[in-house]
């Protein structure tokens, strides 16, 4: 694999594969179709399943949220458009961490577009009567308030739960596997140095690898239970007895491979060269090799998505990424010190894996992410010339004696000679 294999074998001080960002979607199966909404209201004792029943439930949720905010004594923030919500919440989470306090730390509100149930009188229906109106229900676009509940969790660190007070009550939860690993390392007494949301170094690499590999769907479910126990719940105990309950699916999973270099300049030199050499990486046939899935580029069965190589240079830190359907894989230098290759799976079905949050699907997606990272890294290594070792370069650039005859060294930087000193070697000065 040329340069990249040698870089990873000889110049990496710490390397770790871990789950990074995790997104979980919560939904109530019984509220995903019109008949289920009618049954939900009838089970609650409404003689006529009208929109008033859902309005009552929304008002109850709002009251419970207000009571929660008062009891927990946490601030409420109205997010403005295009604000980074995580940046606003981070100081509150860090303050809770410093105080050793777990639980809710901030409530945010934001109007966001969603699809919610709307009921209206259907006078054309045969069952409609003046004293017994018939209501029809449709899923329609709306822009209601969504509530962001930010937590500091003893096992997971920063996490948040987003809920909507309008049926079918979509829920979204987000956490970070690297932050979970940090909490577990601290509990195990293993020292570590953070690299943004990852790990730069650890005192026990083997234990760090075991901890990162141990993270499973059960740990995610435990976090969901703790957060939902504090949040206002659209479902009551009677609703659950009637068969309405939460189900969870894996909406997003990021699997990362991070290699920390002992001499970052070697990684920078290689990565900058790799970008120039692999601007064709996004071609359908090459994407197919990376994701190990069939890609059809023409005809009626054309694979959806845009196939292109993207070089993103935000904050002068370039990323090389390609897309497959709704998922993507990218490579970049993290804080200029580590090469990170990261697969983001936004739809498990892109890789023929079910979305349901359980151990089997979790393991399958982790395997897909790790394998995709490895193939992407291998693709970046293709066509890269091998790096001569330091001894070879020294024999070229320094004077030497052969069979009693002195030979001058090959000086770098002169016209007609080498243009510069190789960045992977220590400076001669």
Image (cartoon, rainbow, N blue to C red):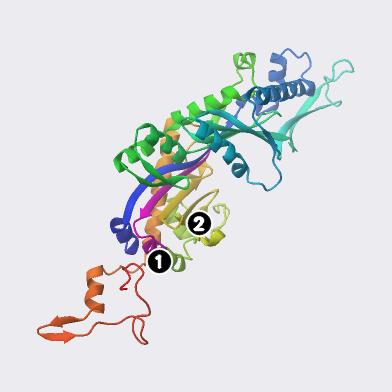
Whether the residues at callouts 2 and 1 have beta carbons within 8 Å, the answer is no
Residue 71 lies in what quarter of the image? Answer: top right
> From this viewpoint, is residue 406 visible?
yes
The furthest residue to the left: 403
On the rendered structure, is 189 left or right of 173? Answer: left
* Residue where numbered disc 2 is placed: 322
> From this viewpoint, is residue 309 visible?
no
State which tag comes first along the sequence, 2 or 1. 1
Magenta stretch: give its range.
Answer: 251-269
Vertical relation: 375 (above or below) 117: below
- Of tags 2 and 1, which is closer to the observer? 1
- Residue 247 image position (x, y, % from top left): 56, 27
* Residue where numbered disc 1 is placed: 269
Q: Residues within 10 Å of mark 1 (few under 14, many from 20)?
A: few
- Residue 43 image position (x, y, % from top left): 69, 14
Front position in the image: 225 or 354: 225
């Amino acid at each position: 694999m040329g340069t990249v294999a040698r870089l990873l074998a000889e110049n990496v001080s710490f390397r770790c594969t871990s789950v990074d960002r995790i997104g979980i979607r919560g939904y109530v199966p019984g509220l995903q179709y019109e008949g289920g909404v009618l049954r939900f209201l009838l089970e609650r004792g409404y003689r006529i399943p009208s929109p008033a029943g859902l309005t009552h439930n929304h008002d109850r949720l709002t009251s419970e949220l207000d009571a929660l905010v008062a009891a927990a004594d946490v601030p409420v923030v109205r997010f403005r458009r295009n604000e980074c919500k995580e940046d606003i919440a981070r100081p509150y989470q860090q303050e809770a961490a410093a105080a050793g306090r777990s639980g809710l730390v901030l409530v945010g509100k934001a109007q966001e577009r969603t699809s919610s149930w709307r009921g209206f009188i259907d006078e054309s229906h045969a069952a409609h009567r003046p004293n017994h109106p018939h209501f029809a229900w449709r899923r329609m676009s709306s822009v209601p308030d969504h509530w962001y509940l930010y937590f500091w969790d003893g096992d997971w660190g920063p996490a948040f739960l987003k809920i909507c007070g309008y049926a079918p009550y979509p829920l979204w939860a987000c956490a970070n596997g690297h932050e979970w690993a940090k909490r577990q390392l601290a509990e195990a007494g293993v020292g570590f140095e953070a690299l943004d949301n990852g790990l730069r170094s650890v005192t026990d690499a083997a234990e760090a690898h075991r901890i990162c590999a141990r993270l499973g769907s059960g740990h995610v479910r435990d976090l969901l239970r703790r957060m939902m126990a504090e949040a206002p719940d659209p479902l009551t105990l009677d609703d659950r007895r009637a068969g309405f309950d939460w189900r969870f699916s894996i909406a997003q999973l990021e699997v990362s491979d991070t290699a920390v270099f002992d001499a970052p300049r070697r990684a920078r030199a290689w990565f900058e060269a790799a970008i120039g050499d692999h601007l064709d990486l996004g071609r359908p046939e090459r994407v197919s090799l990376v994701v190990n899935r069939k890609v059809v580029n023409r005809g009626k069965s054309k694979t959806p998505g845009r196939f292109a190589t993207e070089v993103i240079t935000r904050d002068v830190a370039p990323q090389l990424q390609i897309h497959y359907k709704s998922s993507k894989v990218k490579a970049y230098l993290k804080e200029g010190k580590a090469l990170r290759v990261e697969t983001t799976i936004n739809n498990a079905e892109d890789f023929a894996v079910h979305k349901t949050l359980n151990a089997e699907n979790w393991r399958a997606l982790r395997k897909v992410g790790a394998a995709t990272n490895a193939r992407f890294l291998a693709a970046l290594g293709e066509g890269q010339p091998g790096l001569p070792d330091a001894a070879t370069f020294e024999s070229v650039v320094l004077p030497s004696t052969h069979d009693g005859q002195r030979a001058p060294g090959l000086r770098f930087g002169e016209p007609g000679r080498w243009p510069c000193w190789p960045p992977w070697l220590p400076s001669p000065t």
